[in-house]
Image (spheres, grey):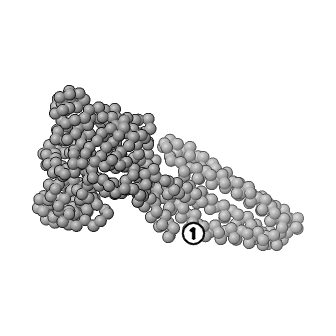
Amino acid sequence: VIFKRQNRLTDISRPNYITIGWYDDPKNAIGVLLTRLATDASQVKGATGSQLGLFTKTVSTLLTAIIIAFVYDWRLTLLILACIPFIIAANAVRLSSVAGHVSKDQKALEEASRVTLLYGLTYGIAQCATYFLEAAIFRFGGWLIANFLCLVFRAFFTVLFGAMNVGQSTSLAPDFGKAKVSAQRIFQFLDRKPLIDSYSEEGTKLFDGNTEFRDIHFIYPTRPEAQVLQGLSVKVNKGQTLALVGSSGCGKSASIQLLERFYEPVAGQGFADGLDTKSLYLQWLRSKLGIVSQEPILFNCNIAENMQYGDNSRVVSQEEVEEAAKAANIHTFIENLPEKYNTRVGDKGAHLSGGQKQRIAIARALVCKPAVLLLDEATSALDTESEKIVQKALDDARKGRTCIIIAHRLTTIQKADVIAVIHNGKVVEQGTHSQLLAKEGHYYALVNAQVSH
């Protein structure tokens, strides 16, 4: 029980150390990991719990039985020993069959009948081989009795102590086969070394908001054929607002993920205050980044607790929560609720509207007092009225700090200090709203396309 509990606790804590890109692979999807967490520890327990004790008892009994059998009749015992390799071989086939099918995903439903047939066939062969060999031992024992070479009770006890214990010990093969595969999966997971060590305490603690990408090339690990960024270069100074615009899939969100160091670029460098981001203390760097995404994730707890999750490195006071709520233009709404900041938001914020959830997410991002505020299409899922309210909150929130905005609605980024147009993985235009319109290039075309719709 202790091993099983510790095994699961280790499995639970291990995902925190894994690089984000590892989860992009469907084989590492959350459902697969939950299944592994629920089943693998139990499978290993099948070989390390009571079954291990039973196996040890069976083997020790078998060794004792063979010695006793030699005392009763050495000829019958030699036959039993000669049969043991064949019994082991037959069960090895059965074991490999079990292990093989446990380790493989059931890729298609139509393969089920073929897998079942193959498993049944190998199981039947293994069982038949065991019983045929036991029958041969009984037959030889009967011949010894018929020819007055052995007494009945001696032959009976020789077979009972020897052959029966061999059969019992091999009956545990399926449990050990499944446990072997489960243990391999667990240790492969635990022994994996992440490309980016999120818990490393090495690095510099210096980041005021000056951010630069220089000739960045990037591909997602699970999609090596798709070049996402192809020489992206862009810079934003402390206190400025940078807006990244472009068609879907051009690499806007990838840029933010690289700044957060969820991934490593194939080539190029990211800089924070002139230092390579790889040289910064990673947890500290991420603590200086506040992010508001398109669909905020709220937990089924009260409003204050949801905001406090914005900084897990310390205990966030109620005064800080209220200060962040005021900056996010949500404080008045909360104060009018019966339970105020103790109001539960429901599963994923089900008790709140989209605009209310988004403003709570903004407050949560501000709790950590970020040097850089990242807004990833923060208003794209809202209606017009909610968008205006949230946009005002965002405008207030970004004052005095660096802000990087990803937006499809170009009306929301017209006040940005720098607008960078990304096309085919690199910046093709850069400037203010009026400057880019005057060029009548890519940005001009994007604006006209939205106006016409």
Residue 220 image position (x, y, % from top left): 41, 41
**Which quadrant would residue 180 be assigned to in this image?**
bottom right
Q: Quadrant of the C terminus?
A: top left
Q: Which quarter of the figure has residue 226? A: top left
Which residue sits furthest front? Answer: 274
Q: Is residue 142 visible?
A: no
Write down the quadrant of residue 72 in the picture: bottom right
Residue 278 in sight here: yes
Q: Residue at x 24, y 57 (%)?
A: 369
Give the answer, above or below, for where 230 lies relative to 167: above
Q: Position of residue 80 (x, y in %)?
A: 77, 62
Q: Which residue is mark 1?
A: 50
Q: Residue furthest top?
A: 440
Front residue of this view, candidates 51 and 359:
359
Q: Amino acid at mark 1?
A: Ser
In the image, is 144 to the left or to the right of 349?
right
Could you say which is closer to the camera, residue 257 or residue 187? 257
- Residue nearest the viewer, comparing 2 with 38: 2
Q: Residue at x 19, y 59 (%)?
A: 324
Say which of 146 and 120 sits in front: 120
Image point (70%, 71%), residue name: 61
Residue drawn 17% across the image and 28% down it? 438
Asked if residue 199 lies left or right of residue 153, the reply is: left
Tell me the element at label 1.
helix
| Position in image of residue 403 (x %, y %) | 23, 47
Badge 1: residue crowd in 10 Å (few <14, some 14–19, many ≥20) = few
162 in relation to 379, above or below? below
